[in-house]
Image (cartoon, helix red, strand yellow):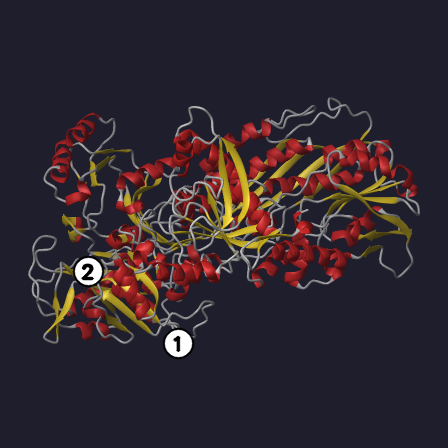
Amino acid sequence: MLFAGKRCYHWILLSLSFLYLPTENPVCHAPFQMADQVLVVGSGGREHALAWKLAQSPCVKQVLVAPGNAGTANSGKISNSAISINDHAALAKYCKDQKIGLVVVGPEVPLAKGIVDDLTAAGVRCFGPTAKAAQLESSKSFSKAFLDRNGIPTARWKAFTRAEEACSFITSADFSALVVKASGLAAGKGVIVAPNKEEACKAVHEIMQDKTFGAAGETVVVEELLEGEEVSCLCFTDGVTIAPMPPAQDHKRLMDGDHGPNTGGMGAYSPAPQLSKDLLLKIRNSILQKTIDGMRREGVPYVGVLYAGLMLTKDGPKVLEFNCRFGDPECQVILPLLKSDLYETVQAIIDRKLSSHMPIWHEDCAAVTVVMASEGYPGSYAKGLEITGLSQAKELGLEVFHAGTTIKGGKVVTSGGRVLTVTAIRKDLVSALEEANKGAGVIQFSGAIYRKDIGYRAIAFLKQSRGLTYKDSGVDIAAGNTLVQKIKPLAAATSRPGCNADLGGFAGLFDLKEAGYKDPILVSGTDGVGTKLKIAQLCNKHNTIGQDLVAMCVNDILAQGAEPLFFLDYFACGKLDVEVAQAVIAGISKACTLAGCALLGGETAEMPGMYPPGEYDLGGFAVGAVERGQMLPQLDRVADGDAVIGIASSGIHSNGFSLVRKIVENSPFSFSSPSVDGSGDQTLGEQLLTPTKIYSKVLLPVLQSGYVKAYAHITGGGLLENIPRVLPESFGVALDAFSWKIPKIFSWLQKEGNLSEEEMARTFNCGIGAILVVQKEFAGQILKDIQKHEDAWLIGKVVPHRSGSPRVEVNNLLQALHANKLQMLHRQLSKRRVAVLISGTGTNLEALITSAKKPSSYAQIVLVISNKAGVEGLKKAERAGIPTKVIDHKLYSSRTEFDSAVDKVLEEFSAELICLAGFMRILSGPFVRKWAGKILNIHPSLLPSFKGANAHRLVLEAGVRVTGCTVHFVAEEVDAGAIIFQEAVPVKIGDSEKTLSERVKEAEHRAFPAAMQLVASGAIQLGGDGKIIWSLEKQN
């Protein structure tokens, strides 16, 4: 048995210590086109910090900030812009005129108003979530309902639009309903934590009736008062992958000791030592990743920065609120800890490639940000006060990020409540706070106020002297006990004659006599899963890896002819995650049922420091039995000319994954890329995780028939090293790779890794999971018996072995792999690239997608374009994994200009055909002429009758008895192009426009896909005279 070597990885994203080492002479190595000009939207300290970090990129020539502040006015690469950020059409035009390659949005209000949607539709790259995704912040009621729908921990709550109902709930709730929130955006101040029910009701009236927060308070959310410590956990995300940032803690109260009124934030520090690596991992998986997965499932992919405000309760972390952007002042304390190029990270996120450009953070240091505010803040305050000492703060090695500042008469003066922030990065929290306070001390303006105790909770936490417990060392006995209770029913479900599979004892028992054995030989096997585990952990997919573990063990003991009786597992980790462990063991239990063996017991080893957070290892042990006279292999019976039957594998199974991972690492692909054969919504990672086949139930009757001379499991060592293990020294085998079906993943691996024929045969199973050696005369019947359950083939024969020659000769392997590649290439080349244009629900789009997903399809939908944002058709496309673009026609001055923008995107995606599926725009002449013979439209009548709108009404008024639908090529005259496909629909007595429309739509769902396939296959073309040309050969 070959054991793959384990490799240890340091998970930089969960590290809690940072080192501030500025990069010298940076070089731009972005894999995307350079965006010399970057625009940052906003005017606060957050936006200054964003501009400061973006300007450090060698890929960026200039950063413009709109409207900006005194700190962003003419500071190196950074300068301000007077362009209005409220007029999105004008802003899009400005970006194009100024050749802005990237827009980064700082504050929440523009995001909630759809700035990302509008700029993206206009062809401007913009970083941040769409307006629908930003509802996580802009609507507290949406956010809370989303949390409940997706099982993400949060406080109990209820939303109200009437003050009296809210107060009644506060009075009668069976929990402390003392937190009152304005549901809309309120500049971070719309939350009131009341000391009692009377004050909570008063807060409701102030928000809903006195309009303290304006329209944001039309709906209020009343929720449970949680107890614990608040922390801020932010992450970058591209809608699939998340990259957590160091955790931070904000200080909302105005004065030291958390006294005084609530503010937008008076300072922050990072990282927060209260969050252990294990707790960070839990937050990552159960809150951040779960949120991103939930938004994607609901058809609203979240792309940008997600900020989770959490309360660390005795029951674990719970979400207080989401923000859809960097916090302020969290941004000013976190970004200085980012070692990576922010520009490159943002571009990777927009391109949905975050998994291959994960950010790296400085280690072994801490950051503290102190906010300096105007006297009177958060109430009324004076403006125009001169600020001095800024250069002295810089000389102390501090970063000063401006917020409420402006330049007046050549001097920097105050213009807001929170004026600026001072950030210090030092080796520890105490020294960072001392330096930040020094900086705040040298900066002067009349009445300046700031807190001197930022991070006091963390400092107190670090100074605590606590008695150690076993849990402090990293071993959670309670979690282990919880796991045992969860998996007991899983094990019990695998009970079989001889064993009741009841967990909890010191040892497991098996009664061979009860199992029906008379003179048994016990057979044992042990194995692991190897580095396939790394892919499961990276993909956060743990429910199939257990089958790999069981299969690797039980398939081995079949080589002795043994029936698997019972199985034991070993699960080792640094920190036990009960949900992950339960998913793994559920997979083991299911696999034991498939194998016919009992899950008799196992060991869960929690070993702090042995494994990085999120990683685990598996070991399996199987015991089987075979009657003494039925043992395999029967070496003395193997003879020259015996047939070799190959049984299909499900894919790579569980060997060679160190090489697989290296190939993926060196390729342009990632585990989140589409699968190799492009089937369904499967990713490459999911394809590689296809579980190992378990052969025991299918093959045991065959092995016990007396006709099989030998069985070999094709495991580590591939075809070359496993088959000889069951043959006499005097024999080998000759196999023909053209005789079996090789899964396409092997052709892909050979091509991407440039692997030799020998390397393929020695490392991988190449599509054969097991082989049988049988007498030639019986091979046909045995093959038929196996083929009732599994794909199997006659793949070769036993031959005499000559000294010095290989024991296994695999003929035509490279040719078969190359034939596979050509087949893949042919399918890719033969599939026409289709773009679908929509304006609404996309009912026909769904039918087109279903048709294109079929293996026999000649069409591949590569893009869906809508002229309206947020329509249902876009969600359908996103759920199908099809890229979408919104190009808002209202942002263009003419039809031709709009069509030109559409044409540009079509060219970018190399579209070859266009289907108009409810696209409510008339295309311009130049566009139609350019795409002549390549645009398909469907009309709800049998053209040329009843052209134009209101076709169903015209049909009913005319009294005709037959109507239908027509798919035609688009010509410059409306509904006049050459007809491709028609389907008739009878007009029934008593039909209304509605009932007729519904039946015609059903016909459209058949006709449009059929027409798309005819054109994509080349069976139909548009001739130069505007008439249809049929290719009968391709049609057949």
- Going by the numbered disc 2, the residue's amino acid type is Val
Point out residue 60 in the picture as x, y percentages from the top left corner.
36, 72
Which residue carries the number 1 mark? 24
What residue lies at 60% left-to-right and 27% top-to-bottom?
493
Dots 2 and 1: beta carbons under 8 Å?
Answer: no
- What is the total number of numbered labels drawn onto the structure image? 2
Can you tell which mark lies on residue 371?
A: 2
Characterize the local packing of mark 1: few (<14), some (14-19) or many (20 or more) Cα atoms within 10 angstroms: few
Q: Is residue 632 left or right of residue 996?
A: right
Characterize the local packing of mark 2: few (<14), some (14-19) or many (20 or more) Cα atoms within 10 angstroms: many
Q: Is residue 741 left or right of residue 274?
A: right
Judging depth in this view, the residue of 767 and 350 nearest the camera is 350
Which of disc 1 and disc 2 is earlier in sequence? 1
Point out residue 616 in the picture as x, y percentages from the top left corner.
54, 47
Can I make out residue 605 in this image?
no
Secondary structure at badge 2 equals strand
Task: Give the residue furthest to the top.
Answer: 514
Point out residue 544 in the picture as x, y percentages from the top left corner.
58, 41
Point out residue 102 in the picture as x, y percentages from the top left corner.
35, 65
- Going by the numbered disc 1, the residue's amino acid type is Glu
Task: Give the residue furthest to the bottom.
Answer: 25
Classify 199 as above or below 368: above
Secondary structure at badge 1 equals loop
Marks 2 and 1, Cα distance to the nearest angstrom? 29 Å
Judging depth in this view, the residue of 137 and 611 nearest the camera is 137
